Amino acid sequence: MQLFFVVSAITLCLSADRKSGESQGTKKYFIRRFFRIAPLYYFGIIWYFLFRSAQTSLKAGTLQAADSYTLANMLANFSFTHGFYPPAHNYIVPGGWSIGTEMAFYLCFPLLFLMFKKMNQNGVFRFLLLFSTTIACYYIFENWAVTWMDSPVEKNNFIYYNLLNQLPVFTLGMLAYFLTRNYGAAKIPAVINLLFLGLFTWLTIFLWHTDSFPQKTFMFVPFTAGLAFVFLYNLFAQIRMLNFSILRRIGQVSYSMYILHFMFAWYGAEYLNKWFGGYGRPLIELGMYYLLTIVFSFALAMLSEKFLEKPGINAGRRLIQKMDKPQS
């Protein structure tokens, strides 16, 4: 998910620059963000509730709602506050933690963007120094916060997913945007981008699997992953031949693919494994399930884009157009 967070921050910065000076800009920004995310996510809440409830009812032989779909958990997801409510943060919609974290970042973005613009006025060296100092102070604060809450950052736990631990990843995307726009960071030699991509990928995998360091070092995993993806982004920006049209199209429907792919990655693969499991090598079966998940998720995502995402975006545009009409 760190790749999506980095790209999301870059995209938001690009949009903010393009729309600077727009009347009621902050209000319109929040409208755009809500109508970009909410329609599909609300569909996901309802769809997974019905699907899981149907599974539960079939097993029980009577009509039952799926576990964890309580009123509080549902309301937390509908209001996008589930990233701050442990019982609801990652079950109502599979992978929904990232949407809660993303929406929380959207709230912070206007202030962060202003902060980065001010930092950017000091030249590249002071900009990087201020950014590094800010990140260091932030991690000191996070260390104090998780110690005070007695809730350490662990693999895939609530604090690991929370904006508290993921915010530095978004700021990496913002840093990449300003450096690329003003100082040509995308012109870093491809071999350097590749070197640092490999270095930070290795470091991320190492920190994820090792027990050699204090547990508190695990909070740095999203940040090292984010650094790897910044250099990957630079690599794709430099080498145009990597930008295949199919990859661009997947990027355009990636939100729908993310929300919907669990149907195939979890449930579809489970049923396929019952039918075909054991007939081939595990690695071949895994590759087959992975390919089928991509193909079916992509096909369903194109329908979702047409009937959910675009209508939602257009609804937000119409609301903004009404705001721009002179009052009679």
Image: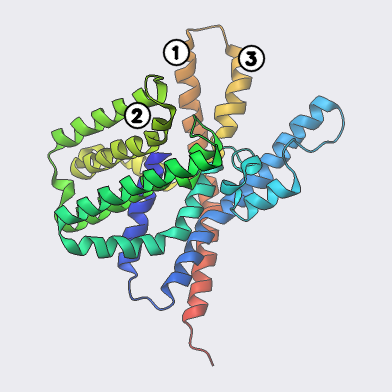
Numbered label attached to residue 274: 3
Disc 3 packing (10 Å; few <14; some 14–19; many ≥20):
few
Report if the CB atoms under discs 2 and 1 are less than 8 Å apart: no
Q: Is residue 287 above or below residue 80?
A: above
Disc 2 packing (10 Å; few <14; some 14–19; many ≥20):
many
Instruction: Name the residue that disc number 1 marks.
Output: 283
Tell me residue 324's x, y (percent): 46, 80
Which amino acid does the dot numbered 3 rest on? Answer: Lys
- Give how far apart the Cα atoms at labels 3 and 1 are: 16 Å
Tell me residue 170's x, y (percent): 37, 49
Q: Nearer the viewer, mark 2 or mark 1?
A: 2
- Give how far apart the Cα atoms at labels 2 and 1 are: 23 Å
In the image: residue 63, left or right of residue 315: right
Q: Is residue 110 above or below residue 206?
A: below
Numbered label attached to residue 49: none
Q: Earlier in the sequence, mark 3 or mark 1?
A: 3
Question: Which of the two residues, 93 or 245, is positioned nearer the viewer here?
Answer: 93
Question: Which of the two residues, 130 or 24, is positioned nearer the viewer here?
Answer: 130
Which amino acid does the dot numbered 1 rest on? Answer: Leu
Is any atom of residue 41 visible in this view?
yes
Report if the CB atoms under discs 3 and 2 are less than 8 Å apart: no
Instruction: Name the residue that disc number 2 marks.
Output: 204
